Image: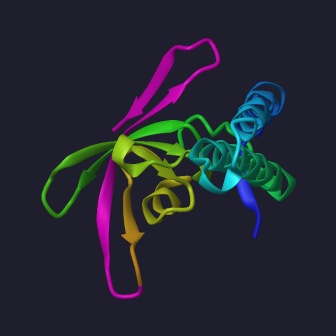
Amino acid sequence: MFNQLTQKDIEAMEAEIEERKLVTRPKLLEAVKEARAHGDLSENFEYYAAKREKNKNESRIRFLERMIRTAQVIPDDSREDEVGMNNTVEVEFEEDGSVETYKIVTTMRGNSLAGLVSIESPVGKALMGHKAGERVYVQVNGDFGYYLKIRSITNTEDDGSDKIRSF
């Protein structure tokens, strides 16, 4: 399975890898060396803690490298009038009339508690490619789904300004 990432996601991951290799790794290796010098390793908690932190860093580097290696690069732009990557969408739930705002992002940046909805989530899949004013069906599973109405779509332009399309 490929990870759908934008070029910006990949660049951010590469920057994190570089930081972890060039800055974090030498510090952690020094901490392991220092803890090892304190004597008997069988009762040296500092040594085991330092090794654990070093291993976490190495594991994160391997994870990020694998994500980049298996990535399917997708565009981070969208059509002028449709929901796409990095758009902020205001939706109304038909069932109770409540209104929510979501930003459509890649799976790597998805965080539903912060309003960041992955393009691979049921809501993200349902919204992609639709226009303000349209009614969309969110299929949660084989037995359950619900309707949303897209109230507005906000796209952050390259110059930092927001362009809003609403119904």
The residue nearer to you, when weighing 79 against 113, is 113
Q: Nearer the viewer, residue 108 or 103?
A: 108
Q: Position of residue 16 (x, y in %)?
A: 73, 33
Report the magenta residues as a range.
Answer: 142-167
Residue 100: give x, y in percent of width and height: 27, 45
Q: Main secondary structure of the magenta part?
A: strand
Is 116 on the left or on the right of 53, as rendered? left
Task: State the residue at coordinates (77%, 30%).
Answer: 30
In percent of the image, x 64 and y 50: which residue is there?
48
Give the image quarter of residue 142. Answer: bottom left
Left or right: residue 74 compared with residue 145 = right
Direction right: furthest residue:
69
The question of residue 55 being in magenta is answered with no
Q: In terms of depth relative to the viewer, which is nearer, 100 or 136? A: 100
**Magenta residue check for 144:** yes
Quarter of the image where the C terminus is located: top left
